[in-house]
């Protein structure tokens, strides 16, 4: 078992410096709360969690284990990011193999930044006529919102700064950090 993050922890990934934003304990507490809310809402309904890869796999794995009752999981891979900036276009790299018609779908995201990714994916999802769709994201950057998307359950609203950890990466690294770290700007 790893010790809780020191809130003053600074880390370096490649060329960038990050500072602790949310400790492992804070993240886990919130995930349990969200799991409890979903457990109540979907009692007896066998919902399908759809995790958007890659970043959301860590959150989805914790969230579905915080869900008490029958549930299933599926994965889609969308790509929009290069380095620390969201690129303009979204691609479906891997689609979902399950039949979604009539299913209660819980879309699990790691972070909603501009909203472009989720906006794109929800449009695709609607076509498959699920019985219901709800959206959950562990992080949201409200200042960055550019696309109209409803996020039913948000873990934490954060500043519009690049973050890593808990599934989120900078150039491939940082996904295994149990807490969440924010980019330190203007550091010498
Ligand atoms: P949009 O702008 O489409 O962005 O809402 C959502 C996707 O972009 C990635 N993203 C980030 N990844 N740190 C990351 O490691 C961040 O601060 C960040 N902001 C957005 C992420 O993959 C998300 O699904
Ligand atoms: Mg990424």
Image (cartoon, rainbow, N blue to C red):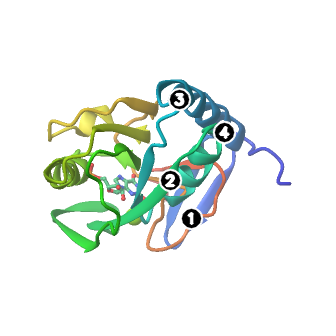
CB of residue at label 2: within 8 Å of ligand 1?
A: no
Q: CA distance from mark 2 to mark 3?
A: 14 Å
Mark number displayed over residue 174: 1
Report the front residue among 72 and 79. 72
Question: What residue is shown with label 3?
Answer: 43
Mark number displayed over residue 28: 4
Q: CA distance from mark 1 to mark 2?
A: 27 Å
Question: What residue is shown with label 2?
Answer: 72
Of labels 2 and 4, earlier in sequence is 4
- Does dot 4 land on a helix, a strand or a loop? helix
Viewer-nearest of discs 4 and 3: 3
Of labels 4 and 1, earlier in sequence is 4
Q: CA distance from mark 1 to mark 3?
A: 35 Å
Report the front residue among 40 and 2. 40
x 61%, y 39%: residue: 69
Residue 65: give x, y in percent of width and height. 64, 46
Q: Are marks 2 and 4 in contact (CB under 8 Å)?
A: no
CB of residue at label 1: within 8 Å of ligand 1?
A: yes
């Amino acid at each position: 078992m790893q010790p809780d993050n020191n809130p003053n922890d600074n880390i370096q990934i490649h060329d960038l410096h990050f500072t602790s934003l949310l400790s492992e304990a804070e993240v886990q507490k919130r995930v349990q709360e969200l799991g409890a809310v979903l457990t109540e809402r979907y009692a007896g309904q066998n919902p399908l969690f759809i995790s958007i890869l890659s970043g959301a796999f860590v959150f989805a794995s914790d969230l579905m284990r915080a869900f008490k009752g029958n549930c299933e999981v599926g994965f889609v891979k969308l790509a929009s990011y290069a380095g620390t900036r969201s690129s303009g276009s979204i691609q479906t790299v891997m689609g979902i193999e399950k039949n979604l018609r009539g299913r209660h779908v819980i879309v699990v995201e790691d972070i909603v930044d501009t909203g472009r990714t989720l906006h794109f994916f929800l449009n695709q999802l609607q076509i498959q006529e699920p019985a219901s769709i709800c959206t959950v994201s562990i992080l949201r950057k409200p200042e960055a919102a550019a696309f109209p998307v409803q996020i039913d359950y948000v873990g934490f609203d954060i500043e519009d700064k690049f973050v890593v950890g808990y599934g989120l990466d900078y150039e491939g690294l940082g996904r295994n950090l149990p807490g969440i770290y924010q980019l330190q700007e203007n550091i010498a």
